[in-house]
Amino acid sequence: MPIAPLPQTRPSLSFKSADSGILVASRSAMLIALYYAVGLWGYVFTPDPYGIPLVWPATGVGLAFTYLYGYRMLPALGIATGLILWQFTEDAMPLVEATGVVLATMAGVGLGAWALRRFGFSPGFERLRDVLLLLVVGALAASGLAATAGAWAMAVSIEELGFSDTWWLCWVADLIGFLLVTPALIAWLAAGRRHLDSGLPMIVLLAASLIGVSALVYSGVLETGLAMPLSYAVFPLVMLAALRCPIQITTSLILIVGAIALSGTGWGLGPFADAGLEQSLLSLNAQLALLVLTGLLLAALRNERESAEARGRQHLDDLARAGRLSTLGELSASLAHELNQPLCAVTSYASASRRLLDRERLDDLRDALTQLDSNAHRAAETIRQVRATAMSETPRQVAMAPRDLITPVLELLDPELKRRRVRIDVDVARSLPHIRVAPVQIEQVLVNLLRNAMEAVETRLDGTIRVAARNLGTALEITVTDNGPGIPEERLATLFDPFATWKSGGIGLGLPISRSLVEAHGGQLTATNLDDGGARFRFTLPLEVPDARSQTPAGLSGRR
């Protein structure tokens, strides 16, 4: 049914509005102060008497605030632009032209912020398209409109100035200031101190190196022939920062290098100062533009690579989870298969115990209860090991003699062998070296192979199974051979595939599980047909200590 909205009291709404108003006012004050500060810095680089700066970062400040905090920042931008024009161009620019510059700046910044939002710009520069989008928006919208309005106002107010030449100087000044300031401002205002907890030594070292190199180049101490090539030493440092540091640090380091280079050149110092202020700053602007693009593009490429790796890891996790869900069904079938034999034995021995108790045959009852207890423990151990396998735990292995491994299996299956009237020949040497195995797992392999052999020979009057073991030098070989009809030739290739069975009532998991258990011990399980009929299953297990001598089967031998 529909749920009524929670009531809202007027005090909470008024507090929210008050908080929002205070936040907008504080951000607006921050915008005006920062815009005015970088405007003052930009007017340091004014080589001609008409007040045209060659670096103008103020437009980039307005775009960063408007993109992040919305169009409510535009009035503050208009106020900041008006203050700059009133202080520096009051005598040269009439009120109408100054108003046109303010409105055009607000329109360019508003259009740029809209374009960044509309086309999905990410302030973390996570893709190459973010860098290209910021460059296009800055060049065409924000810087383009502001430069057009400024050039028009200057050309109208001052007869000596032509529009095209003035527009070019204004556009270059806006664009370079935009490239230096806007990425750093957006990165810091959007991300703050996030992702800055690690890599502090690297950040400090890079900052010290870049500041040291830049200060040396633009201090006027070095000759131009040495200072000019040294000015390019900042490129590998910025590239390293882009590949190793967060985007806030990369953009801040670029801004610091640009500020040192522009300030030094504006004061007539450094390798770009010899050609005159206007020509020097234009040459330096070209170098700084390349530096900004290098850092931003490398940072974006790194972010794209990391995002692709994260998506790849997530894809692998999804595949692994899907694999676990798919395996759950197989695990359930495997568990049922593995528990079937010990639980059937428990049922048989429980019934036998009841009959023996009725007949007061206590000695036989004790043996039956012992077997019942053994099979109950076997079932519990099977569940534990299946669970350990599902949790990727390594089962505990022990060293034991092969005859100690085979004998309990034969005792377990002895009632079934007698019921089916199957003869079993055992040929195991007493002197065989020890093997290190998880006993329940290898015993389960033997149970599976022996049960398959019993089913193969149960229609024969002379059904016989032979179990043999021998030392191969580096491994122990155990074979289970029967004189049944053998394995159909067309089934040999898929014999160990899960759920591949041709027997009535079988689920096709016994042999795949057996092969997996043997391979987990470092051995191999194979099957072949005999020339005179019957099948032979052979599996190997590495010896605890390799023995170069081959042992002759002798010791535990006989018939059952």
Image (spheres, rainbow, N blue to C red):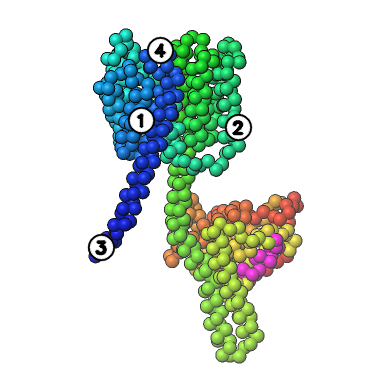
Q: CA distance from mark 4 to mark 1?
A: 23 Å
Please provide percent x and percent y for residue 52: 38, 17
Q: CA distance from mark 3 to mark 4?
A: 68 Å
**Which residue is identified by label 3?**
4
Task: Give the vertical position of 359 relative to 212 (above or below).
Answer: below
Look at discs 2 and 1 and give the one toward the viewer.
1
Q: Quadrant of the N terminus?
A: bottom left
Tell me what residue is drawn at x 60 percent, y 77 percent.
373
Characterize the magenta stretch by its predominant secondary structure.
helix
The boundaries of the magenta stretch are 399-410
Label total for image? 4
Q: Secondary structure at mark 4?
A: loop
Do labels 2 and 4 touch, CB within 8 Å?
no
Amino acid on which the number 4 mark rests in the picture: Asp
Can the viewer see residue 450?
Answer: no
Labelled disc at residue 205 = 2
Sequence-earlier tag: 1 or 3: 3
Task: Give the vertical position of 550 relative to 58 (above or below).
Answer: below
Look at discs 1 and 3 and give the one toward the viewer.
1
Do labels 3 and 4 touch, CB within 8 Å?
no
The quarter of the displayed image where residue 234 is located? top right
Residue 385 part of the magenta segment: no
Sequence-earlier tag: 3 or 4: 3
Q: Residues within 10 Å of mark 3 (few under 14, many from 20)?
A: few
Sequence-earlier tag: 4 or 1: 4
Can the viewer see residue 3?
Answer: yes
Tell me what residue is drawn at x 29 percent, y 15 percent.
157
